[in-house]
Amino acid sequence: MTLALPDTTHLDLSDDLTTPFPPPLAHLTNPELLALLHQIDPTPDNLTDTAARDWSDLPDRMHYIADMFRCHATHHPLLTPPFTPHQVAALTAGHLPTGRL
């Protein structure tokens, strides 16, 4: 299974993540965030074994998702609107928009 990001990046969910944590998220200090990650990330501050071996297994999936969002949190294409104004108009009218979705 793969995940296509808004640019040309494709993530194979069965491979470990390789994008390093961006500087603002390299060293976490928020106690609530650290407590949450302690529950879902068996390899804290590390991308070892982030690959989702069984996507139907919620802990396996959450480990990948948590690190994926942390790795790509400052990735500019993810901060842009997901749909063009033309696509929003088509969706609002109840139609399937054209173009990349």
Image (cartoon, rainbow, N blue to C red):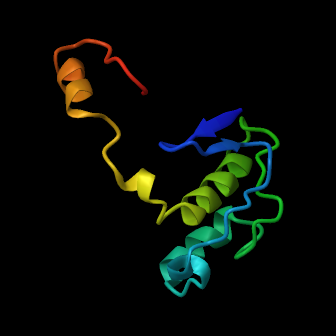
Q: With respect to residue 31, does 7 lie above or below? A: above
Q: Is residue 34 left or right of residue 47?
A: left
Residue drawn at (34%, 17%), measured in percent from left and top? 98
The quadrant in which the C terminus is found is top left
Q: Is residue 58 left or right of residue 82?
A: right
Residue 79 picture location, percent across and down: 37, 55
Between residues 24 and 36, which one lies in front from this camera angle? 24
The quadrant in which the N terminus is found is top right
- Residue 21: quadrant of the picture: bottom right
Residue 26 picture location, percent across and down: 60, 80
Between residues 32 and 82, which one lies in front from this camera angle? 82
Q: In this view, does 25 lie to the left or right of 78?
A: right
Residue 69 picture location, percent across and down: 55, 58
Residue drawn at (52%, 84%), measured in percent from left and top? 31
In the displayed image of the protein, which residue is found farthest to the front? 8
Residue 59 picture location, percent across and down: 70, 51
Count of picture labels: 0
Q: With respect to residue 34, does 47 lie above or below? A: above
Residue drawn at (43%, 59%), measured in percent from left and top? 76
- Residue 88: quadrant of the picture: top left
In the displayed image of the protein, which residue is found farthest to the top? 95
